[in-house]
Image (cartoon, rainbow, N blue to C red):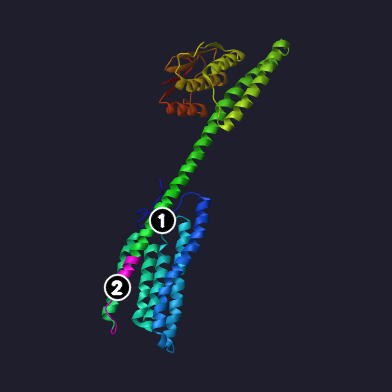
Amino acid sequence: MIPRGPAGFGSAGTTVAPMTLPVEFEAAAGKASRVTLLLAGVWLVFMIDPVVSQWSRRDQPSYLLAIAALVAFSATYLLALLEHVHYRSRMVLDMPLRRAYTYLAIMVALSVVMWIGLDQRGSGAVIYIAVVAAFALPTRHALVVVPLVAFSELAMTALVPGWEVDFYTPSIAAGAGFMMWGVKQVMARNIELVMVRTEKDRLVVEQERNRFARDLHDILGHSLTVIAVKTELAGRLLDIDIERARSELADLEMLARESLADVRRAVQGYREITLPGEIARARAALSAAGIEHELPNSADDVAATHRELFAWVIREGVTNVIKHSRAGICRVHMSATSVRVVDDGLGCETQGAGHGLTGLRERAATIGATVHARNGEPGFVLEVVT
């Protein structure tokens, strides 16, 4: 979800980015500020006309005061634009209301001084006031302020003695305000697209991190459990059967190398496990732990699309039997549509807890399978049904 203000994008709310901004967006915002200043400065060329037309009054204090006001007005206009770009670079389209109305109040006050010194020709300042109102204010405020500015200009031309009724300038002011509002909506859509893309990238990274953590748990959890069991067995055999102890140590070395290879493949993202391989591993691990076992001799009945999931079920189930169950026997039942690992051990008080079962549920969900984990009578049952 993209956070919005009270009324969302294109309305009254201020939209704030809830995440770190992309580097390219920040760089583009810096470039945009320079472009914005240039383009805004070009439009101020139209403010030269009233200065030139009233040049004959250059000796009058009111004219000189109007020129100073015009310079200050232009600077205020440019500062408002630059501040808007600054907020936009942070994915905020509306200025704080107090700040926006401060800019507008200063511009209105300066425009009054310009009207006094330059007569009706200085009234073109309302166009720039309307533009600032459109991009600085939330929509519900701009919909009131822009027409009010345009109507006020029209009323002045009708009420001020010596001024001609002018529909052209108020129309330009209203049109410029509406155009700037439209540009602001395009900015809002672009910002929303950037935020959606950034959120999508963040979710991809998070999913990959979760996958990697799950895979490492599944790989190392099983391998380290078997290594611990074989190490304990080899230690007991040193004083009883040195040759078998050497055999167990050789198995430990092989298992450690295989685990290292699995970790490397997981890091590369290419690790796969096979169902026959996991059955063979489970048989060896259970034998090393001194647990009787009944395992399927073939996986031919299982569809290719289910084999990897069934292999993970056997790995997780057998690992938990060795680590936690204190079982005397472990049975693995497998059909074309289901696999079940059952033991006669202590069971589990916290069903469904831990990374292993969470990882199994995630894998099962990808092919529409269901994971059942429950206490048996006695022992524990882990079952996946497709």
Q: Within 10 angstroms of label 2, few (less than 14), some, or many (20 or more) residues?
A: few
Q: Is residue 325 visible?
A: no
Q: Within 10 angstroms of label 1, few (less than 14), some, or many (20 or more) residues?
A: some
Per the image, is 162 magenta? yes
Which residue is drawn at the image coordinates 41% and 60% (left, top)?
94
Query: Quarter of the image holding residue 150?
Result: bottom left
Judge left or right: residue 289 versus residue 303.
right
Judge left or right: residue 68 versus residue 179.
right
Provide residue 317's location: percent of width, then percent of height.
51, 20
Looking at the picture, tell me which residue is in the foreground, 361 or 118: 118
Give me the C-alpha separation between circle 1 and circle 2: 29 Å
Say whether disc 1 or disc 2 marks the residue closer to the N-terminus: 2
Provide residue 325's location: percent of width, then percent of height.
54, 18
- Disc count in the image? 2
Magenta span of residues: 161-176
Looking at the picture, tell me which residue is in the foreground, 154 or 224: 154
Q: Amino acid at mark 1?
A: Met
Which residue is drawn at the image coordinates 35% and 79% (left, top)?
121
Quarter in which the C terminus is drawn = top left
Instruction: Identify the disc placed on residue 168.
Output: 2
Per the image, is 279 magenta? no
Provide residue 287's location: percent of width, then percent of height.
59, 12
Quarter in which the N terminus is drawn = top left
Q: Amino acid at mark 2?
A: Tyr
Q: Is residue 48 visible?
A: yes
Disc 1 + disc 2, Cβ < 8 Å? no
Looking at the picture, tell me which residue is in the foreground, 11 or 64: 64
Q: Is label 1 in a helix, a strand or a loop?
A: helix
Which residue is drawn at the image coordinates 46% and 76% (left, top)?
72
Instruction: Identify the disc placed on residue 187.
Output: 1
Provide residue 45's location: percent of width, then percent of height.
43, 73
